[in-house]
Image (cartoon, rainbow, N blue to C red):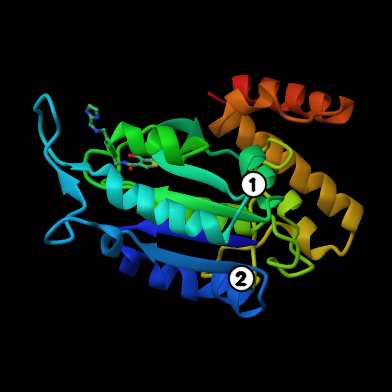
Amino acid sequence: MTINILTIFPEMFSGVFSASILGRAREQGLLDITLTDIRPFSAAKHKNTDDYPFGGGAGMVMTAQPIMDAMASVSASLPGARRIYLGPRGKTLTTALARELAREESLILLCGHYEGVDQRALDTCVDEEISIGDYILTGGELAAMVLTDCVARFIPGVLGSAESPEEESFSDGLLEYPQYTRPRDLDGMSVPEVLLSGDHAKIRAWRRRESLAATLRYRPDLLKTAELDAKDQKILKELEESCFSES
Ligand code: 21W
């Protein structure tokens, strides 16, 4: 997959895109990320990319011209790319949306900064707007990193073959079960015996129960849309009853 990111702060991205799984994906050629600095496209005297808002108000607004010219340049090299503006009004990024975006050949991500972007640039240069949640950031750069990270996990080969993105929290709509690694005894704290038993059916059942228990406790809202079979329903009923008797 090819991702081209338009930003006035390209230097913000280097660590995130070079380390760990994203760094490896790029080295393997599974992910081709290009950062496009918007500033050189500015036709203004001092290469300005923002200005005061018409009508008054606090903060600065990014001017349309550099964004429109940068987008035209990048779009010409990536015809058919899905053009996404990261913005707080957009539809919220979810696993389902990330999975869908991972099937695209190429994405162009536009990051705003300051109080936003001249609406005319958005109206002419962008196919859709995506937010990463209901809180306010200082710009779209961190959101573009979050989206890239989340989408990359669904590109075949990016995760090791053993780790499947479908096994993770939220893929079946439940929270994850607790995990343990060595040592078996940590200052008197042991590991649940079942995980050392070698009985894989029993381990699978224990993990499912723990996922259901964690979801019931921390995110009961998720149970309304989770993929649950009759056995899950039975376990949930037990957990609900035992939780009423607890306190
Ligand atoms: C913050 C942009 C506030 C615009 C009109 C009247 C990208 C983001 C961002 C930012 C405003 C995302 C105004 C979750 C986010 C982002 C910067 C509003 C004031 N406009 N996802 N008054 N949260 N944020 N400007 O903040 O660019 S994705």
Asked if the beta carbon under badge 2 is closer than 8 A to the nearest atom of ligand 1, the reply is no
Q: Position of residue 99 (x, y in %)?
A: 68, 46
The residue lying toward the viewer, choosing from 45 and 81, is 45
**Residue 56 appears left or right of 143:** left
Is residue 132 visible to the viewer in this orientation of the structure?
A: no
* Few, some or many residues within 10 Å of mark 1 (<14, 14–19, 20+): many
The residue lying toward the viewer, choosing from 148 and 120, is 120
Q: Which residue is mark 1?
A: 101
**Amino acid type indicated by mark 2:** Asp
Whether 134 is drawn above or below 224: the answer is: below
- Would you identify the image quadrant in which residue 194 lies? bottom right
Quarter of the displayed picture in which ligand 1 can be seen: top left
CA distance separating discs 1 and 2? 43 Å
Q: Secondary structure at mark 2?
A: loop
**Amino acid type indicated by mark 1:** Leu
> Residue 185's mark?
2
* Few, some or many residues within 10 Å of mark 2 (<14, 14–19, 20+): few
Q: Residue furthest bottom?
A: 27
> Residue 203's mark?
none
Give me the residue at 52% from left, 37% from top. Answer: 127
Give me the residue at 34% from left, 49% from top. Answer: 67
Q: Give the mark, 1 or 2, whose residue is nearer the N terminus.
A: 1
